[in-house]
Image (cartoon, grey):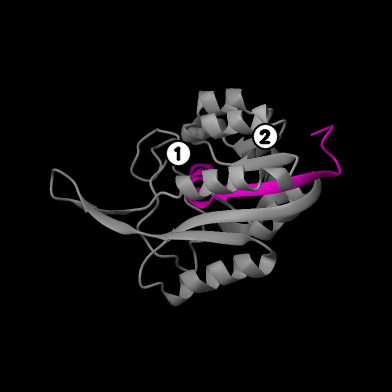
Amino acid sequence: MEGIQMERIALFIDGANVYAAAKRLGWNFDHRKILEHFAGYGVLYNAFYYTAVPLPMDDKQKRFIDALTYMGYTVRTRPLRENTDEHGDTHRRASLDIEIVTDLLTTSERFDTAVLLTGDGDFERPVEVLRARGKRVVVASIPEMTSYELRNAADGYVDFKDIREQVERPGYRLPSEGGRGTETRGTEARPFYTSAALTDADDR
């Protein structure tokens, strides 16, 4: 990533998308290492982490969010909401797209480069707006979960597989999806937020 050293860096992590990528890969991320790795691109302005939470929030979920805060993340949350589909099945979902876009655009004067950890194609237009403002945008995800439009709109792309050594949580594995769909959206790049609360073996 030449040319962005010592620039002001802001990190934006779509928690559900990164978790879905981890399930695809079969290994999990160390969020402290993610912070340290991308902070190495320049001078870190802020790191935002976006995740849905069940209500009431259980102790394990609260500990996870507290840990992220202590690491230096600004954590944005939204409650999971129940919806019933046409078949009568109930799903608990939430989207933090609005929160991500709001932070991307309202804090843009405070960073030179935005590192966006997601593959969601809905962020194509906000990325184009940032670039029109003279900002550099780097997207990080895995190719099979990254929208072509988002990757094309960004200045740079980081494949999680290429930085595994720097960001993996050692000795901690998630069951690989083996190419199957993520969450409840099949092969689409944008997974719904999972309805399950965190367990000791399940960090977002």
Of 51 and 101, nearer the camera is 101
Q: Is residue 12 magenta?
A: yes
Image location (x, y in percent) of residue 12: 61, 48
Rendered image: mark on residue 178: 1
Query: Of the residues shown, which amino acid type is indicated by label 2?
Result: Val
Residue 7 seen by the camera: yes
Q: Is residue 165 visible?
A: no
Q: Earlier in the sequence, mark 2 or mark 1?
A: 2
Q: In what element is the residue under mark 2?
A: strand
What span is colored magenta in the figure?
Answer: 1-25
Question: Is 194 placed left or right of 139 in the picture?
Answer: left
Give the residue at mark 2: 137
The correct choice, above or below, for 107 with respect to 73 in the image is: above
144 or 105, which is in the foreground? 105
Three-letter residue code for mark 1:
Gly
Residue 98 placement (x, y as % from top left): 46, 46
Residue at the (53%, 43%) spot, across then down: 101
Residue 173 magenta-drawn?
no
Q: Position of residue 17 (x, y in %)?
A: 49, 45
- Is 190 above or below relative to 166? above
Q: Answer few, some or many: residues within 10 Å of disc 2's Cα (few below 14, many 20 plus, some between 14 and 19).
A: many
